[in-house]
Image: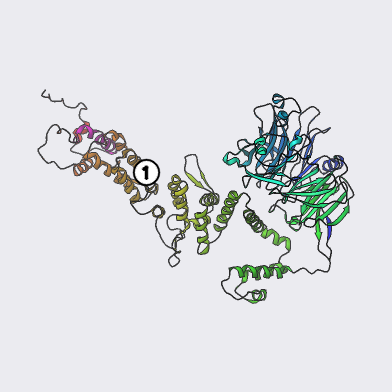
Amino acid sequence: MKRSGTLRLLSDLSAFGGAARLRELLAGDSAVRVRGSPDGRHLLLLRPHGAVAPQLLVASRGPGAELERAWPAGQPSPLDAFFLPWPARPALVLVWESGLAEVWGAGVGPGWRPLQSTELCPGGGARVVAVAALRGRLVWCEERQARAEGPSGSPAAAFSHCVCVRTLEPSGEASTSLGRTHVLLHHCPAFGLLASCRQLFLVPTATTWPGVAHVLLIWSPGKGKVMVAAPRLGLSYSKSLNPGRGDTWDFRTLLRGLPGLLSPREPLAVHTWAPTPQGLLLLDFGGTVSLVQSHGGTRAVGTLQEAPVGPWGSAALGTFQGTLACVLGSTLELLDMGSGQLLERKVLSTDRVHLLEPPAPGMEDEEELETRGNLRLLSALGLFCVGWEAPQGVELPSAKDLVFEEACGYYQRRSLRGAQLTPEELRHSSTFRAPQALASILQGHLPPSALLTMLRTELRDYRGLEQLKAQLVAGDDEEAGWTELAEQEVARLLRTELIGDQLAQLNTVFQALPTAAWGATLRALQLQLDGNGKLRSQAPPDVWKKVLGGITAGKEPPNGILPPFELLCQCLCQLEPRWLPPFVELAQQQGGPGWGAGGPGLPLYRRALAVLGEEGTRPEALELELLLSSGRPKAVLQAVGQLVQKEQWDRALDAGLALGPSSPLLRSEIFKLLLAEFAQHRRLDAHLPLLCRLCPPELAPAELLLLLRTYLPDEVGPPTPFPEPGAEPPLTVGLLKALLEQTGAQGWLSGPVLSPYEDILWGPSTPPPTPPRDL
C-alpha cells in the first residue's frame, strides 16, 4: 500500500516574537538566508551582503526578545551568520567581509547581547569570501593581497586564497573561548564553504580558476583527513589534515601529487549545493541530483520532473527518512534516495519556501518528538513539517506490546540461559517487574504529556548515548567520542549504587579512559580551587557518600576492583599527583573516615596511602603531603619524624606552627621532638626563632631545662672549655637564652616566676669576658 507525504503545520509564526516582521521578510525577498537554531526555538533571517537593504532578524519562539539589526547603505554588513550548537544557551556568530566576527548570546540577560568580538584577519589586507560553522569551529576562506601577487585574472591572483579554522567554544555563563588560527590550505582558489554535522565541503564557485573548478574537497575534522574528489572524473584521494598535529597543505602542491586530477575537464555546472548527513547533494541545470559521499565517491540520486529556471531560480534540497526533498519554485518533489523513483509531487501555494534542518537530537520539545527527523518548510504562511503518513488499514502495535517486545530482546541479550524468552512470559512473570510497571503507565494511568515530562531527561540521555555509539562505530571524531562516552558513563554510574557490576564498570572506565573519567568526576563533585589554592566542593552529601563509601563486610569486591575513593586516588596519582593531598583533605571534611562503610573503617588518608603501595615503596613527597594534610596526630608526628630524618627543618617547624590552638598537645609533641634535636647538634641553630614560636606557652623555664637535660648527649670525659677539632659544638647558655626568655616572658605575664633559674633570665644581658687564648 502506497504511503503519502504530508505537510503538517507546526506553527503559524504567531508564537515567534516579531511575527509580523518575520512574515514580511519571508514574503518579500526570495534571496534571504534562513537558518534554524539547533533547539528549533529560534529563526535567523539575513538579507545578505550586497542586497539593497542588508538586514538581520532573529525571531524567538516563546518568551525572549528578538534581535533585529539593519545596516545603512555604504556601511559594511555581515557576509554570513550562523547559530552555534551550544547546549547551555542559544548563540550566533556574525562574520563580515573584513574579517570581523561577533558572537551574540541569549539567556544570560534580557534579550540578545554581544559576548565577544574578534578579528579573523588581524594582519590586514585580507578579505573573507566564504565562512561556515562546523561543530565548535569557525572556518573561513580569505583572499590575501591578490593585487600584490599579480594582476586580476592571472594564476597568481586566482590562487591567492587560503582556508583557515579557529575553535569557538562557550566559556562560563557569558563569554566565549577562541582558539588560535590554523591555516588548512595555502595558495588555493576561492572556495565556497558548506558544513554538515560531520564534514566541511569546499566547493568551486563562479570565480574559481577554471583549471581546478572540477575539484572539490571534503574535510572530516573527526578523522583528521581531507578527501580530494573530482566527481566528473570519478577520482578521489585521501590525505591527512589534522590541525591538532599542525597539518597544513599548499593546494597546488597537493593537486600536483594526485595523479589524474589536473586532466582537462569542464568546470562543475552546479545550480544548488546542499550538505546533508549522507554527504553533499548537488543539483545541475538539467535537473539531475547527485550525491558526493564522505569517501569521495559520487552517485546519481534521481532526476526531477522540472529543471531549475536559470542560474538565479530558487531551489532547495534536503533529506529525511531515506527520502530526497527538493523545492523548485512552488513545487515540492519527493524522491526515493535508493532508487531515484519519484514518490510524490506537490504544488505549494507560494514560491518563497525555505528548507530547514530538524532540531538537533535531544534538543526537541515534547511536542516535537513525534516529528523528529523530518524536514521543515518555512514560508510566510508558517512553519511546516514534511513527513510520511502511515497507510490506512495498517494496525500499529500498542505501546504496551512494544514495551514487552523491546524488554524481551533486552533481557534475552543479558540472559545466560539457553531457553528463548517470550513476551508472554514477561507479562505474567513476577521476576521482570520493570516492563510491567512501564506498560501499566502507558496503558493510561498517566497521560502521554505527563509521561514525556517525567522521562524527558532520560530519553535525551539515551538518545544521545545511542547517537554517540553510532558515531564511534562510524569512526567519526573517535577521540572526542570516546571521551564523551566515558564522561556520560561515569556520570550515570555516580547516580547508582556503586556495588557489584556498577563498581566493576566504573573501574573499567577509569582504567580505559582515566582523563575523561576524572573530568566527569570533577563535574559531579563540583570541585574548584578557591583563592587560597584549596579545593572546594558544592556537591550534595549524597554524591560524596557514594564516593567515600568503603567496603561493607561480606560484600568485598573481586580482586582488582577498587572502591570509588581508592579508584579516584589511583587516577589522581597517574594524572595529577599534586591534587591528591588536597583532595583527601577535602574528602575528610565532607564525610569523615569510613562514611558509608557500615563501621568506623580506616581513616581516608590511610586508604589513600594504601593506593600508593607498600611502605617504603611510596613516593616520599606525596606520602609526606598526605600525612601532613590528614590532621591526624599520629600521621602528623610520623611526617615530622621523617622531615627531621631528612633534616628539612623549615618544613618540620612549619608543620608544627600550622597547627591551631585546638591542637596544643600535638604542637607540644612536635616541639619536644625538635628540642631533642636542638640539644644534640647545632644544625637547628639557624631556625631558633621558629623554634621559639613553637614553644608551648605553658612551659616554664624549669621544665624546659629539665627537658633539655633529658635530651643532652652523655659526656664521655671531663668537660673542656672548647670542643675538640671536628667535634659537634655543645649547647651553650647563649644559644639557650632565647628559649629561656620565651618561656620566662610567658610565665612572667601569667604570674611571679618561682624558679631557681630566675637570676639567669633577668640578670645583665652582657656575657662574661672571653678568657685569653694561647697563641
Count neighbours of disc 1 (C-alpha within 10 A) and say few if under 14, some if 14 to 19, many if 20 or more. some
In reply to whether residue 743 is colored magenta, the answer given is yes
- In the drawing, does residue 422 fall left or right of residue 349? left
How many numbered tags mark residues here? 1
Residue type, mark 1 in image: Leu
Q: Is residue 593 above or below residue 350?
A: below
Q: Which residues are magenta?
A: 728-752
Q: Position of residue 569 (x, y in %)?
A: 45, 52
Residue 67 in view here: yes
Q: Secondary structure at mark 1?
A: loop
**Quadrant placement of the N terminus:** bottom right
Depth check: give the residue in front, 665 or 371. 371
Q: Quarter-wise, where is residue 417 in the image?
A: bottom right
Name the residue carrying label 1.
659
In reply to whether residue 452 is colored magenta, the answer given is no
**Quadrant placement of the C terminus:** top left
Q: Is residue 69 above or below residue 620?
A: above
Depth check: give the residue in front, 325 or 427. 325
Residue at 38 percent across and 53 percent down: it is 613
Depth check: give the residue in front, 119 or 532. 119
Q: Position of residue 469 (x, y in %)?
A: 62, 56
Q: Quarter-wise, where is residue 92 in the image?
A: top right
Instruction: State whether the magenta stretch is mostly helix, strand or loop.
Output: helix
Image coloring type: rainbow
Q: Quarter-wise, where is residue 203 in the image?
A: top right
Q: Position of residue 296 (x, y in %)?
A: 70, 48
Residue 174 in view here: no
Q: Position of residue 299 (x, y in %)?
A: 76, 51
